[in-house]
Image (cartoon, rainbow, N blue to C red):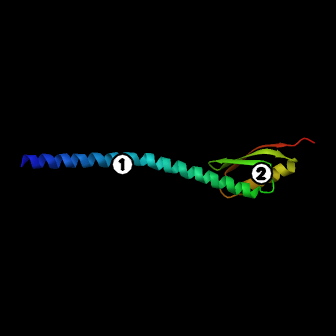
Amino acid sequence: MTNTKLIASLLAAASLSLGSAAYAAEPQQDAAMAGAAAASGDTALTSKVQAALADQKSIGVASANGVVTLTGTVANTDDGTKAIQAASAVAGVKEVKSELTVASK
């Protein structure tokens, strides 16, 4: 009878250990999934901004956490301003950073 109680106790302890190990892994999985979601969100946002700037092929677009960075050369300041405004109007854009340069004449 004592062997039965010992085996039952060991099984109970083992199941508790496995349960707590699975619980401890969940935050790491959640963080990894959140990072993947942010990366795919950045990719989607970059695509949306590129589509909004489709007529300006010389402008590069990158995004991270809703912050869009525009790079490249524009013909004049009006084109640069229009690009910044178009990027700002895209849903999901929190901020636009301009690294645009104006072409010399």
Q: Which mark is residue 49?
A: none
Q: Quadrant of residue 98?
A: top right
Residue positioned 77% across, 51% down in the render: 84
Mark 1 touching mark 2, by CB under 8 A?
no
Which residue occupies the extreme front position in the image? 57
Q: Amino acid at mark 2?
A: Ile
Name the residue nearer the viewer: 33 or 90.
Answer: 33
* In the displayed structure image, the side of residue 78 where residue 86 appears, left or right: left
Which residue occupies the extreme left position in the image? 1
In the rendered structure, which disc, 1 or 2, sits on the residue that comes first in sequence?
1
Question: Label 1, label 2: how many angstroms apart (C-alpha)?
Answer: 46 Å
- Quadrant where the image shows the C terminus: top right
Q: Secondary structure at mark 1?
A: helix
Q: Secondary structure at mark 2?
A: helix
Task: Give the crowd class for mark 2: few <14, some 14-19, many >=20 residues within 10 Å.
Answer: many
- Count up the numbered dots: 2
Residue positioned 52% across, 50% down in the render: 34
Task: Give the crowd class for mark 1: few <14, some 14-19, many >=20 residues within 10 Å.
Answer: few
Q: Quadrant of residue 86?
A: bottom right
Image spot of residue 38 (x, y percent): 57, 50
Image spot of residue 4 (x, y percent): 10, 49
Q: Amino acid at mark 1?
A: Tyr
Image spot of residue 69 (x, y percent): 71, 46
Image spot of residue 5 (x, y percent): 11, 48
Residue positioned 55% across, 52% down in the render: 37
* In the displayed structure image, the side of residue 91 where residue 27 appears, left or right: left
Residue that numbered label 1 is attached to: 23
Q: Which mark is residue 84?
A: 2
Residue positioned 66% across, 48% down in the render: 63
